[in-house]
Image (cartoon, coloured by chain):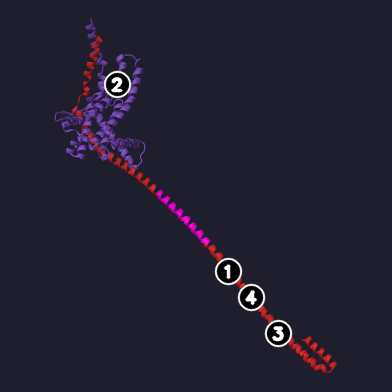
Chain colours: A red, B purple
Amino acid sequence: MAIINNLAFLAFSGGESSGGLLDVNPGLIFWTVITFVLLLVILKKMAWGPILNSLDEREKLIKDSIEKAEKNQADAEKLLEENKVNLARAEEEAQKIIEQGREYSDKLKAQMLEESKSEARKMITEATSEIERKNQEAFNNLKDQVADIAIDAAEKIIRANLDKEKQTKLINEYLEDLNKN
Amino acid sequence: MELKTSTAIQDTLQQAKGDVGSDWIMHHILDAPYFQFEPFNAIPLPHLSLFGFDISITKHVVFLWLVAILLIVAFKIVSNAYKKSLVPHGFANFMEVLIVFVRDDIAKPTIGKGYEKFLPYLLTVFFFILFSNFIGLVPNGATITSNISVTVTLAVISFLVTQAGGIMKNGAWGYFKGLIPSGVPAWLLPIMFVVEILGLFTKPFALAIRLFANMTAGHIIIFALIGLIFFMQTYLVAPVSIAFAIFIYLLEILVATIQAYIFTMLSSLFIGMAVHQDH
């Protein structure tokens, strides 16, 4: 009983003494309002404005940089793709040109070969006919000469036929002449 | 006999209260008209009055200004750090983490569109409470947030900012009409009106009491634990007292941070609810 009494006393007196805890002090409220409002104004002007601006600026810079990098990468990829296509096309073109050149050179070679062959054939034909002609001419000449010689010899034989001795002498002379010639 | 004993015990207790009772705890927590940096003598502070109101400079006013000066100096340093480089390091970087936290994790999700207008207020109140709470944890420092006058003032400012934000966004009539949720039957309107107006004022009341009680309770527990040594007049209790006091002190560091966050978060939430009433 006494204990409860004492505890009650303690609690009660404790409560009484801490009554100041919930006291509202108008002076402190006044100073708090003034200080807080001034602090808000000063910090807004001096700190929050510049700091938040810097943060925004930095964030924008980072965002822009990333966007730019992404765009650059996309561009580079596109360029690479284009280059690849161009390269493939160029290679194809080159292949075609080489093919064409080879074809052309083959054709040219064949043509030239054909031409030279036909030329050679013509030349051979010409030479053959020339030879034929010359042969014919030489043969004709020879024939004429042989005929002339025969006629000549026959004439001389007939002329010297009067005496045998003279005849022999004549023949010898003639032969000698012939030899000399 | 019993009565006599009881009286004697009460006398003893009263005597004890005078010496080692709860008064010395209150002495540390309550405001005082002098500034004392123990173990030095107390310096009396000027007594002022304005239009009959007592606006004396008290211990808590001194600490209020100390917090304000510290905040201005700290954020001047941070602000200057940004002039040198867009990516500051050290102290400025640490403060930036907190600023970005208030912006991205408190203001942006709770207010949404148009949060930029309220950001300076939220940042100021966050850092003001944070610095106040931590200065209260420094030995010889006074916790201004454990004074109900300060927390009530902060809550009222938060209330005014909330109402101003709501009225500026929705117009005075639209704002008060929007307080009552749509689709309520007509006969419920008088009751809803009373409930909503009541709700309007309970929010800052809860803000003020929450901050005040949290910051006061921890300090009282620490003082009570230390006081146990003197109250029981034995050294044997000292290790337990000190161990628990240190534990509570560490808890207080957590509470100091969390309360700054909660006050700002709830203020931001109320602003968001006032600005965007449709949801």
Dot label at residue B158: none
Dot label at residue A141: 3
- Quadrant hosting residue A126: bottom right
Q: Which residues are magenta?
A: A73-99
| Residue A124 showing in the rendered view | yes
> Is label 1 in a helix, a strand or a loop?
helix
> Is label 2 in a helix, a strand or a loop?
helix
Asked if badges 2 and 3 are on one and the same chain, I answer: no
Q: Determine the chain carrying the residue at label 3.
A: A
In 3D space, how far apart are the residues under numbered discs 4 and 1 (Cα atoms)?
A: 19 Å
In 3D space, how far apart are the residues under numbered discs 1 and 2 (Cα atoms)?
A: 117 Å
Dot label at residue B221: 2
Q: Earlier in the sequence, mark 4 or mark 3?
A: 4
Provide the residue designation for mark 4.
Answer: A125
Q: Residue furthest top?
A: B1
Asked if marks 2 and 3 touch (Cβ < 8 Å), the reply is no
- Residue type at tag 3: Asn
Is residue A76 shown in magenta?
yes
Q: Nearer the viewer, residue B157 or A123?
A: A123
> Is label 4 in a helix, a strand or a loop?
helix
Q: Nearer the viewer, residue B229 or B155?
A: B155
Front: mark 2 or 4:
4
- Residue type at tag 4: Thr
Provide the residue designation for mark 1.
Answer: A112
Would you say B175 lies left or right of B103 here? Answer: left
In 3D space, how far apart are the residues under numbered discs 2 and 3 (Cα atoms)?
A: 158 Å
Q: Determine the chain carrying the residue at label 2.
A: B
In 3D space, how far apart are the residues under numbered discs 4 and 3 (Cα atoms)?
A: 24 Å
Q: Main secondary structure of the magenta part?
A: helix
Q: Determine the chain carrying the residue at label 1.
A: A
- Residue type at tag 2: Ile
Asked if badges 4 and 3 are on one and the same chain, I answer: yes
